Image (cartoon, rainbow, N blue to C red):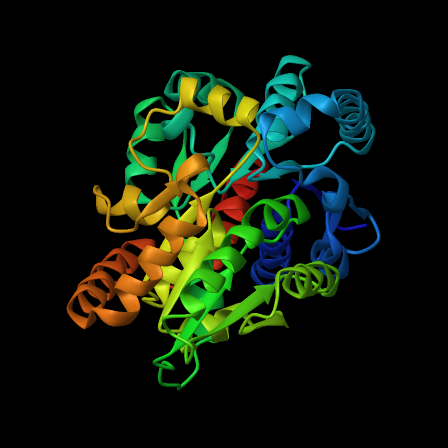
Amino acid sequence: MGRLLYLVAGEPSGDTRGAELIEALNEVRPGWEFRGLGGGEMRARGGTGVRAWVAEAGVVGLWEVVKRYRWFRARFEETKEEIARLRPEAVILVDYPGFNLRLARDLRRTGCAAKLVDYIGPQVWAWDRARIPKMAEWLDLMLCLFPFEKEMFEEAGLRTVCMGHPIVDQLEAARIDVERTRKLVGLFPGSREREVARLFPVMLEAAGELQGAHPDWHFEAAAASGELAGLMQAMVRERGPLPVQVVTGGSHKLMQRAWCGVVASGTATLEATYYGLPYCLVYKVSWPTYLAGRLVVEVDHLGMANILAGREIVHEFIQREADSGNVASFIEAVMTDDTYRRELEANLLDTAGRLGEGGAVRRGAEAIVDLLDQDRG
């Protein structure tokens, strides 16, 4: 039996990142055995010992989590029991901080002998900086994305490696040689049904408002799955007739083809930033979730492009502001004002340079192997 590692990811993006890490770990040091929680991608690379749960675990918002508290509590206890039984060399926590930081705390308090590694440091600098010293007590290694995060974690005494953003390799591999289509608007309503249900109608309404004045503009909407594509197509039919085509997958190509975009808050905004797509950010959650978040958020901006830039370069339409009128006005400004569009594109590409170089996943895997080798040595 190979050396055992236990990974926990709870969202589709974490499943992708975890799968990349499993692959890189096997390249750096073949022969690992993997167990844990993730999704289809992690299971495909790590084997049947990785259980797919992200479809159930990947909920968005405090209120949604509260409604399913008993389910999450049961999974939490099961995970602790499995780790105690398997006794892995390391527990690698892939993003998903609401669950994973509590897991790290409880594992440390109960004397878990495994090395505890946080892969993709949580954005506690945005919502709970007071937790950083506690994390230094719970964790053995932090693998973060941005240099400013490394400074924060190391000041608290936590061993930290800034690996850069894994998304860079993925996006560079998906780069295509194509010119942007002058009259094409890209719509990116998110990867979860709840997001799509809240945001896609706003995008369709904006398209409808623009249709009369600009009948030659057309819209493509990227669906993250066939199931979401069906839902989105039904929304188009209900609202139609509209010049909106729903495509399954292909979001990276659309980001490179479109003249401007409307993007749901999340990883897709970083992707759009990397490709220099002039876009606005839209965000809507339940009001209890939003109000609870406002009480703890310690940064001025929601979008990572704005956080990295230290100023607002991307318009953020949040809650009530995420309406069809604001979105339509933004689209019209970008589509008709070339000077404004070029300035926004240049700011985005400059900010994208702060995502780091390629090879992040490899650096993360090497740091984990070094940690375990030192422990054995």
Identify whether 295 is placed above or below 47.
above
Q: For the point 57% across and 66% down, which residue is it?
A: 222
Horizontal relation, residue 229 to residue 154: left or right: right
Query: How many numbered marks are there?
Result: 0
Identify whether 190 is placed above or below 141.
below
Q: For the point 21% across and 41% down, which residue is it?
A: 310
Report whether residue 359 is seen.
no
Horizontal relation, residue 168 to residue 347: left or right: right
Residue 125 position, x and y percent, is: 36, 28
Identify whether 98 is placed above or below 265.
above
Horizontal relation, residue 336 to residue 53: left or right: left
Residue 241: name its quadrant: bottom right
Residue sitting at the far top: 109
Residue 358: name its quadrant: bottom left
Q: Nearer the viewer, residue 244 or 117?
A: 244
Identify whether 6 is placed above or below 315.
above
Residue 98 position, x and y percent, is: 59, 27
Q: Nearer the viewer, residue 77 or 70?
A: 70
Report whether residue 352 is seen.
yes
Q: Quadrant of the C terminus?
A: top right
Residue 334 position, x and y percent, is: 28, 65
Residue 126: name its quadrant: top left
Q: Nearer the viewer, residue 285 or 172?
A: 285
Q: For the point 21% across and 42% down, which residue is it?
A: 311
Residue 250 position, x and y percent, is: 56, 73
Q: For the point 26% across and 62% down, which residue is it?
A: 333
